[in-house]
Image: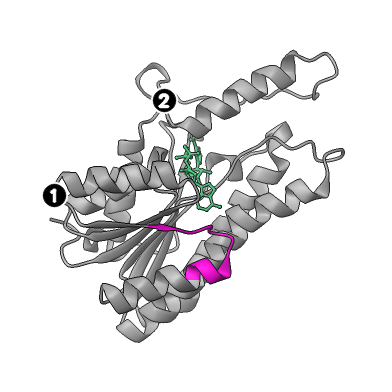
Amino acid sequence: MLLEGKVGIVTGVGMGMGEAVAKRWAREGSRVIGTDVNDEAGQAAIETINAAGGEAYYIHADVASEDDWQAISAYAINELGGLHILHNNAAVHYWFDSINDPMEKWDQMMAINLRGVLLGCRYAIRHMITAGGGSIVNTSSVSALHGVPLQGLYGSTKAGVINLTRSLARAYGPQGVRVNAICPGAIDTPMLHAAAAEAAELYSNENGPTGSQGGSGPSLDGGRLGSPEEIANVVTFLVSEEASYVSGVFLPVDGAMMA
Ligand SMILES: NC(=O)c1ccc[n+]([C@@H]2O[C@H](COP(=O)([O-])OP(=O)(O)OC[C@H]3O[C@@H](n4cnc5c(N)ncnc54)[C@H](O)[C@@H]3O)[C@@H](O)[C@H]2O)c1
């Protein structure tokens, strides 16, 4: 097993990629703390892990809340004996009209998608330094790697995640902390389907946004969507000792969308 003896935190465990990662980590021998703001979905995911013989704990936590990060990192360290691996997965997506939408939308998404990742890294790295090391995977997006008309906000949060990841990797590599990012492409999760439905509605409106929403799509296997489990494979590899010399990368997992 790749993660025997580890204690890990996965944010946004209730569905999609976070759920798949938590399940995989538990199968690889890690004890997992899963967090979410959707308690029903989060608790259900954790119950499935425990019913399958894993050891997982659900804690309500908003990634944008510093108090919540304090509580979950303290739980990991004091109750489970450490914090070895962290997956900053949780984020929100909505389309954003950069010149007309209210700035509150900008502040809200920045707080969750970027500030939330920084908070997780801060609490984890402070402990990992004293513990002699650890490994973090942050979730960026292909939206960080190119321009999309209504993703000036989402893409900026995800581009921020990449630079934060690289900076932290260089800053804390000397103390044994590895920090990597993944850039998922089109992955079959509730977020993708909600975003696609919302975009179709926006673009069907004659007063809707200008500019093409399209760009390149996935290429692999006739352009199919990726699965959450295919993301979990990569995240698990990156946090494990199999990737002991990999730090500071931002890895597209996108079926050649950005190739
Ligand atoms: N689905 C895609 O195609 C795609 C592509 C590129 C990147 N991503 C990124 O991958 C990650 C996972 O996305 P997904 O598609 O599985 O999303 P999802 O919406 O299907 O699931 C996200 C989970 O995070 C939780 N969450 C939302 N806000 C939270 C908060 N403030 N605190 C804690 N939990 C919160 C939600 O309740 C939900 O359970 C996100 O960072 C997303 O931006 C997704």
Seen at 45% across and 63% down, the residue is 248
Amino acid type at circle 2 is Leu
Across and down, in percent, residue 223 comes to 43, 20
Seen at 53% across and 59% down, the residue is 63
As drawn, the label of residue 65 is none
> As drawn, which residue projects farthest toward the bottom?
130
Seen at 41% across and 38% down, the residue is 16
Please tell me which residue lies in front, 166 or 205.
205
Badge count: 2
User: In this rendering, would 71 be left or right of 233?
Assistant: right
- Up the image or down, 204 lies above or below 160; here it is above
Which of the 4 quarters of the picture holds residue 233?
top left
Across and down, in percent, residue 70 comes to 48, 73
Please tell me which residue lies in front, 153 or 197.
197
- Residue 65 falls inside the magenta stretch: yes
- Up the image or down, 152 lies above or below 209; here it is below
Is the residue marked 2 within 8 Å of ligand 1, measured from its CB? Answer: yes
Disc 1 is placed on an element classified as loop
Other-residue count near label 2 (Cα within 10 Å), few / some / many at <14 / 14–19 / ≥20:
some
Q: CA distance from mark 1 to mark 2?
A: 30 Å
Residue annotated with mark 2:
225
In front: label 1 or label 2:
1
Is the residue marked 1 within 8 Å of ligand 1, measured from its CB? Answer: no
Residue annotated with mark 1:
53
- Residue 21 falls inside the magenta stretch: no
Magenta range is 59-69
